[in-house]
Image (cartoon, grey):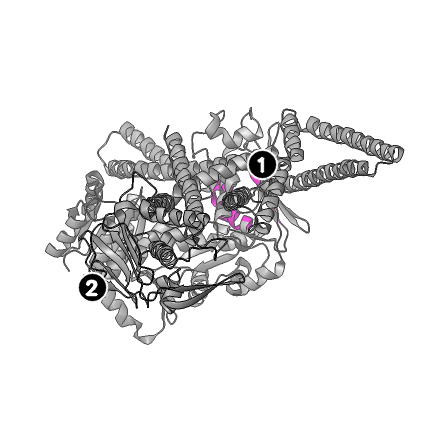
């Protein structure tokens, strides 16, 4: 609804723009035409000051002058007083007569005593003094026998210097009132109005004469018409300008409409635009070429039409750019084909594409040959154009196919690289293919998989961190009450006057609280190391020495046990890079397990074997219980429900040993073969020199 | 000399009570506080000789309290905390604590540490006087006189065998340096070393039992696993 009203609003404002331009164009060109015509001088002036009025007066004066001097112009000038002559004189006089009340004329020739007038009253002309006119006659021109005088609204007119009078029929009389010669063809006409009195007086209000045609009234009427035409013209022009200004103010909407228009234009195929363009250009060329030959209206219309053509072309290019050319029938057909292709799976689409191309190429080659043959057979050269078109089409289609095929192959390479990157753990680099590529959906799927991996990794990191935090907090919360328990158990143990069995109970409490303490610490350590939060200080150490030290540390317990340790460690150092403290913990746990779970009287084998790259520690012992679990279960038994949970220690010893070994850079393996329990730890051997140097420090 | 007064600070009253009983049994006077602010007040109002301080407490935590106490007083502070990370220990010691005991602790060990700190604090003047002849090598609680070849821990003499004395002398004179078992053997016993790890370790363990408060977690005589042995310079 909103967009619809917006669209109609855009159209309305654009319409303003369209009309404004048209109106202004018409007015400007029409106005130019009007300006060139004479009527304009009538606008806004007193009718009696216009050139046309002065001209009218001059003609009338000339008529009177001729009449009074018997020089009425006829074809046969010298045959005066003929019937024809008097008829023409009457006609001229009738013209004066027709002016009616508008005009008083008077002419007298003292030489012939000829008088002509329409005035019944004496105007005081017999004397050479000032004339007296009825009041309503505010304009007169008067030749008193020597010179011209005139008056308008009581103000004297200077007829001799007024260029507008000089350029009329009055000119001969002004230059030389007597003895003036007019050349008319091969004839010379003499006027002599010396001593004649000629008067023309015009009424203030010029009115129509119901009995005849009044040229003065006509003049006045024309002036009125011109005024209204011009006012109307200016009004229309103003409306045009107003519309244009409005559209410029709201040019946002104009732009919108132009964009919409551009979109619509964009849908038209190039093939259809070409003829329009050609015809349009032709029109413009014609307009320019024939500007002065054509009629004004036609020129104006053509100019406006070509303006709009250029305007539309501009919008089309601005909105659609190259699309103006690329949106053609062929590409539309290719698009249709793609839509058809998209309904099929990729492998089928690729085959279909090849078959379609092959079919089309064959068809086009056949068409080319047919038209060539027709050309030869009919001796018609113009058919060659069709052959060329079909050939070009064939080449173009093949080019399109090849380009697409190349792109697909390129993309395939990119996708293989991308899969490799994902395999290597890069989840941030995305493969962006354009949506129209064949392998687009494959690339998008890969991107989605990457996102999924990233999300899963983030989630697992977060949950690990939360787990460590939880265990840290829990272990702290467990330790506080345990501190009280241990402290009070200790106080109880110091009580001397307790029964013996109570002392036994307290001893059990002491042992169990001690075990709880170890359990909590082990749990904490294990969770820390498995989540990678524990820090390892790796430096060069001697693996053999570490094992010897650990065994020496446990010497008391080993000699107390009924086990025999068979230790086989090479004399030369076994350099590895690891965290000694953590590795000590590993071997301590392993040897403690051995002491705990070995069958009494058996031998425990501790071997350290090295080759160039690896050092392997093997600890073998015979279990003192049936190991009814597999290798994985024994490590994770704490998690999975215990099958052989011991009564002392945390039960996390092996799990800690494994995790620490792996974090120290070693491999940890367990083998169970009947009652033989075997642990194998493998480490990388690092350069000997580094260790010696470090030892010297 | 008056009976030393020990301030026990923990928000867990039962722990405070248990420690108090143990300290009273040892013959000390005990003051009790249940958070950092109370601890600061107690220090101002009473003559305290040693403080046992928990870290996680309401109002003012143990580390902040340590910093505030250290601005004015030189009383030994032993931190008692459930935080057992190395980084926690380092932080506590660098704030000015003299010792760091993790919960849950062994009451006997705690008493030993209290004694050790008190002895050093009360006899500090004497020890300094003795240093004048420059023959004494010192690290933390330990002092080895190279002239008399005697070792003292917190000022009291430690009875060592001849071999043990030689080992201690070697390690004290080269404090911080790591000695492989072979080198110790060759320099102490004066014989060619062959499979001597056990022999040396036995002696090391015995010395530890004499000089360390908790021989299982030695502070001074340490095994550098996979390399050798050393006495830590503190």
* Picture coordinates of residue A574, whole percent (x, y): 61, 53
Is residue A170 within the magenta segment?
Answer: no
For label 1, the crowd category at 10 Å Cα-Cα, with few meaning under 14, some 14 to 19 and many 20 or more, is few
Residue that extends furthest to the bottom in the rendered view of this protein: B133
**Label 2 vs label 1, nearer the camera:** 2
* Picture coordinates of residue A670, whole percent (x, y): 59, 35
Q: Which mark is residue A624?
A: none
For label 2, the crowd category at 10 Å Cα-Cα, with few meaning under 14, some 14 to 19 and many 20 or more, is few
From the viewer's perspective, tell me whether residue B138 is left or right of residue A600.
left
In the image, residue A97 above or below residue B157: above
Q: Can residue A286 be seen by looking at this rendering?
A: yes
* Picture coordinates of residue A156, whole percent (x, y): 23, 64
**A405 or A469, nearer to the observer:** A405
Q: Which mark is residue A435?
A: 1
* Picture coordinates of residue A632, whole percent (x, y): 55, 30
Q: Residue at x 46, y 48 (%)?
A: A84
The C terminus of chain B lies in quadrant: bottom left
Q: Which residue is mark 2?
A: A130
Q: Chain of mark 1?
A: A
Which range is magenta?
Answer: A547-569
Label 2 to label 1: alpha-carbon separation? 103 Å
The N terminus of chain B lies in quadrant: bottom left
């Amino acid at each position: 609804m909103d967009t619809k009203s917006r669209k109609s609003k855009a159209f309305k404002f654009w319409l303003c723009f369209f009309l404004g331009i048209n109106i202004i164009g018409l007015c400007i060109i029409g106005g130019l035409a009007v300006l060139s015509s004479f009527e304009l001088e009538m606008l806004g002036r007193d009718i009696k000051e216009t050139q046309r009025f002065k001209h009218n007066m001059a003609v009338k004066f000339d008529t009177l002058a001729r009449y009074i001097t018997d020089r009425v112009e006829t074809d046969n000038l010298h045959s005066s007083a003929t019937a024809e002559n008097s008829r023409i004189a009457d006609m001229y006089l009738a013209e004066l007569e027709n002016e009616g009340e508008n005009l008083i004329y008077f002419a007298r020739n003292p030489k012939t005593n000829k008088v002509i007038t329409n005035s019944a009253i004496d105007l005081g002309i017999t004397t050479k003094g000032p004339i007296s006119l009825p009041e309503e006659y505010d304009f007169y021109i008067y030749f008193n026998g020597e010179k011209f005088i005139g008056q308008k609204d009581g103000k004297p007119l200077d007829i001799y210097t007024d260029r507008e009078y000089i350029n009329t029929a009055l000119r001969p009389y002004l230059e030389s009132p007597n003895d003036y010669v007019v050349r008319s063809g091969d004839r010379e006409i003499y006027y002599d109005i010396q001593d004649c009195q000629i008067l023309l007086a015009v009424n203030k209000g010029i009115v129509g004469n119901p009995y005849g045609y009044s040229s003065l009234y006509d003049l006045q009427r024309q002036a009125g018409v011109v005024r209204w035409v011009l006012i109307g013209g200016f009004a229309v022009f103003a409306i045009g300008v107003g519309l244009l200004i409005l559209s410029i103010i709201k040019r946002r909407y104009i732009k919108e409409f132009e964009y919409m228009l551009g979109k619509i234009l964009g849908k038209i195929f190039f093939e259809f635009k070409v003829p329009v363009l050609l015809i349009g250009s032709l029109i413009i060329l014609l307009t320019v070429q024939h500007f002065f030959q054509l009629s004004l209206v036609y020129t104006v219309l053509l100019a406006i039409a070509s303006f709009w053509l250029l305007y539309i072309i501009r919008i089309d290019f601005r909105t659609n750019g190259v699309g103006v050319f690329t949106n053609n029938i062929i590409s539309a057909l290719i698009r249709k084909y793609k839509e058809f292709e998209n309904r099929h799976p990729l492998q089928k689409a690729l085959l279909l594409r090849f078959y379609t191309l092959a079919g089309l190429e064959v068809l086009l080659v056949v068409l080319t040959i047919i038209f060539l043959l027709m050309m030869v057979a009919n001796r018609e050269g113009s058919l060659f154009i069709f052959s060329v078109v079909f050939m070009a089409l064939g080449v173009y289609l093949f080019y399109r196919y090849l380009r697409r095929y190349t792109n697909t192959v390129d993309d395939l390479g990119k996708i293989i690289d991308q899969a490799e990157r994902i395999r290597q753990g890069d989840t941030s680099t995305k493969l962006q293919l354009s949506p129209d590529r064949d392998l687009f959906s494959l690339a998008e799927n890969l991107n989605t998989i990457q996102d999924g991996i990233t999300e899963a990794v983030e989630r697992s990191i977060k949950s690990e961190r939360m787990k460590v935090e939880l265990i840290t907090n829990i272990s702290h919360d467990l330790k506080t009450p345990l501190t009280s328990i241990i402290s009070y158990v200790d106080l109880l143990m110091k009580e001397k006057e307790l029964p013996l069995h109570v002392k036994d109970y307290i001893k059990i409490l002491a042992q169990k609280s001690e075990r709880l303490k170890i359990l909590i610490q082990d749990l904490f350590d294990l969770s820390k190391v498995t989540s990678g939060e524990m820090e390892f200080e790796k430096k060069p150490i001697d693996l053999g020495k570490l094992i010897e030290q650990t065994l020496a540390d446990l010497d008391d317990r080993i000699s107390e046990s009924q086990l025999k340790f068979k230790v086989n460690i090479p004399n030369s150092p076994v350099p590895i890079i690891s965290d000694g403290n953590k590795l000590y913990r590993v071997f301590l746990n392993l040897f403690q397990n051995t002491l705990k779970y070995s069958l009494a009287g058996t031998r425990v084998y501790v071997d350290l074997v090295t080759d160039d790259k690896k050092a392997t520690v093997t600890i073998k012992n015979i279990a003192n219980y049936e190991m009814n679990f597999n290798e994985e279960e024994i490590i994770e038994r704490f998690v999975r429900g215990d099958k052989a949970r011991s009564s002392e220690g945390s039960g996390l010893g092996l799990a800690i040993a494994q995790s620490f070994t792996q974090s120290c850079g070693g491999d940890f393996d367990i083998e169970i073969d009947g009652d033989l329990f075997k642990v194998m730890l493998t480490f990388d051997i690092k350069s000997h020199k580094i260790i010696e140097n470090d030892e010297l420090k | 000399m008056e009976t030393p007064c020990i301030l026990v600070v923990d928000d867990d009253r039962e722990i405070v009570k248990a420690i108090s009983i143990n300290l009273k049994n040892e013959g000390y006077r005990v003051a009790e506080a249940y958070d950092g602010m109370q601890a600061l007040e107690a220090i101002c109002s009473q003559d305290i000789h040693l403080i046992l301080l928990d870290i996680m407490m309401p109002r003012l935590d143990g580390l902040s309290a340590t910093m505030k106490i250290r601005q004015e007083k030189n009383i030994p502070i032993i931190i008692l905390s459930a935080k057992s990370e190395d980084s926690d220990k380092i932080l506590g010691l660098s704030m000015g604590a003299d010792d760091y005991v993790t919960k849950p602790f062994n009451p006997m060990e705690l008493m030993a540490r209290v004694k050790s700190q008190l002895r050093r604090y009360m006899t500090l003047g004497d020890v300094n006087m003795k240093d004048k002849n420059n023959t004494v090598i010192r690290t933390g609680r330990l002092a080895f006189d190279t002239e008399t070849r005697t070792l003292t821990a917190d000022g009291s003499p430690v009875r060592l065998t001849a071999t043990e004395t030689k080992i201690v002398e070697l390690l004290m004179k080269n404090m911080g340096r790591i000695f492989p078992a072979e080198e110790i053997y060759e320099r102490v016993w004066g014989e060619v070393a062959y499979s001597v790890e056990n022999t040396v370790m036995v002696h090391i363990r015995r010395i530890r039992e004499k000089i360390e408060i908790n021989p299982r977690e030695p502070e001074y005589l340490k095994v550098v696993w996979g390399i050798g042995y050393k006495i830590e310079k503190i």
